Image (cartoon, grey):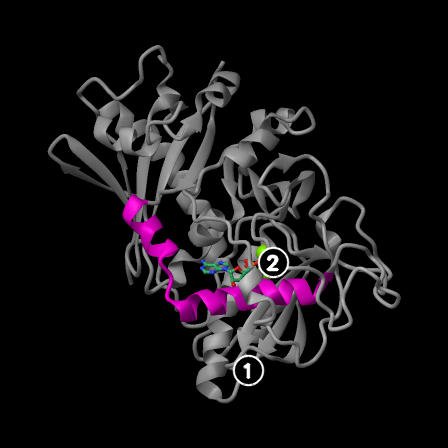
Amino acid sequence: RRKEDGPHVHSKGLNSCLELEFPPTSLGGSSPSPPPFQYPFQLISFSYTPTRELEFTDSALRYYAIPPHGADLSFRYDSWIKRPEERGRLDGLLEACLHERVFPETRRANVISWRGVMTKILTAPYEDRDGWELNVMNVADALYFEEHTTEGKLKEKESMTPRNRLQTYYGYAFESFATSATPSTSDDTSRLPNGWSGDVNTNVQWCSVVKTKLGKMRLLVGGEVDCVKGMSCNKKYTGQPNTFVELKTSMTIRGQTDEARFEKKLLKFYFQSFLLGVPEIVVGFRTPSGRIADLQTFKTIELPRLVRGKKDAWDPNICLSWGDRFLTFLKTSIDELRDQEPNETPIQEGISDAGAHVWRVSFKPGKGVDVRLLDDAGVQEVQNGEDRVGFLPTSYFRKVSK
Ligand code: A3P
Ligand code: MG
Ligand code: MG
């Protein structure tokens, strides 16, 4: 049995670093009692336009529409307008944080992050392959997370193999076949006869910003929502997550190996949806050549029961307990590390606030995470020559740190 007590401090010369280890993920049947999680409440929504402008409208909101059987997910591949790969900046979310409808909650929040980062944190106990790194700041009692992406990693993402690129497109094409710009489905004039609702432009996104609570931590989380329920459903969108729908594609399941692989993927589907309060996930199962062969709707809250007792089962309570420990650990270790630093710390010119520090969290699959304070060179890499305090836009930093 591995240690589950407090974090371990490792002093490596002046560069001290704190480590937090994972609990074992198989506890022989017993599930930890999870910290309370509050159902997400939407504070605001916004849209990215086809030219990637952020606007506080629902112009990018889409409605679910049943996609046709046999739909070809490579349809109009050559017309894909692909948004360039970018660093995991928080800028769009921060714009929402400053909006008058959100700002009071921004001041109360303990954690501000995109949903994708929170999903990575919560699913880390079960991630055995891909490590990740975060940049973290602690400003006016709120932790800000951005994924740390190096130039090398960005280039790697941008130079996808043709096969990977096509498979990525399948996911977006499914969204076009399964949504409509208007809520009607029977007399739907916004879709072509084959169910296509329009060419894929990955600049366009509809995002929801919610407040929620994990344990004692108040979270403000933003993320993309694929669509909301359409007219054929008795519930309609009223500005809250209870009609949100997440769309996914996956290869059809042909045997036990496929099934196990799919059940493993469900962990990510689960937390991605859970964090924004998305109650339903529609999976389009596709053939190897990209045709929709099957549709299945999953209720998010039922997913844990679906995998329970299986060979590679996951337990959401382990993830939530871990997430609670992780956030608490960060809050405490950040103060501790700053106090240990004997040198002058990397605060920028004119910025005297201790909130200007940047921490680097590194996740090692199967082990846990460590956190250290970035030095000047590290902070400069994060700033990337832009007008920022750490990774936050300077104007944002000034508004929240006073
Ligand atoms: P799938 O849903 O079929 O995986 P999301 O499901 O999160 O709304 O994302 C929509 C699509 O974006 C995905 O389709 C996939 O094609 C692409 N996508 C999302 N995350 C990705 C990642 N980390 N790498 C590559 N493609 C990704
Ligand atoms: Mg999406
Ligand atoms: Mg999706």
Please give the name of the residue rendered at 57% of the width and 60% of the height, measured from the top-left corner. 79
- Position of 7 with respect to 257 (left or right) is left
Q: Is mark 1 within 8 Å of ligand 1?
A: no
Quarter location, residue 46: top right
Residue 296 marker? none
Q: CA distance from mark 2 to mark 1?
A: 20 Å
Picture quadrant of ligand 2: bottom right
Q: Which residues are magenta?
A: 150-179
| Residue 54: x %, y % from top left | 61, 36
Horizontal side, residue 326 vs residue 366: left or right: right
Mark number for residue 200? 2
401, above or below 216, in the image: above
User: In the image, what residue occupies the spot 60% across and 25% down?
Assistant: 98
Q: Quadrant of residue 311?
A: bottom left
| Residue at x 33%, y 25% (from the top left corner) | 357
In the image, is residue 154 part of the stretch drawn in magenta?
yes
Farthest-out residue, left: 13
Q: State the residue in front, 150 or 265.
A: 150
**Mark 1 Cα shell of 10 Å, populated few (<14), some (14-19), many (≥20):** some
In the image, residue 343 lies in the stretch drawn in magenta: no
Which residue has dot 1 on it?
287
On the image, the x and y values in percent for residue 366 come to: 30, 61
SS class, disc 1 = loop
Counting from the top left corner in percent of width and height, residue 378 is at 25, 33
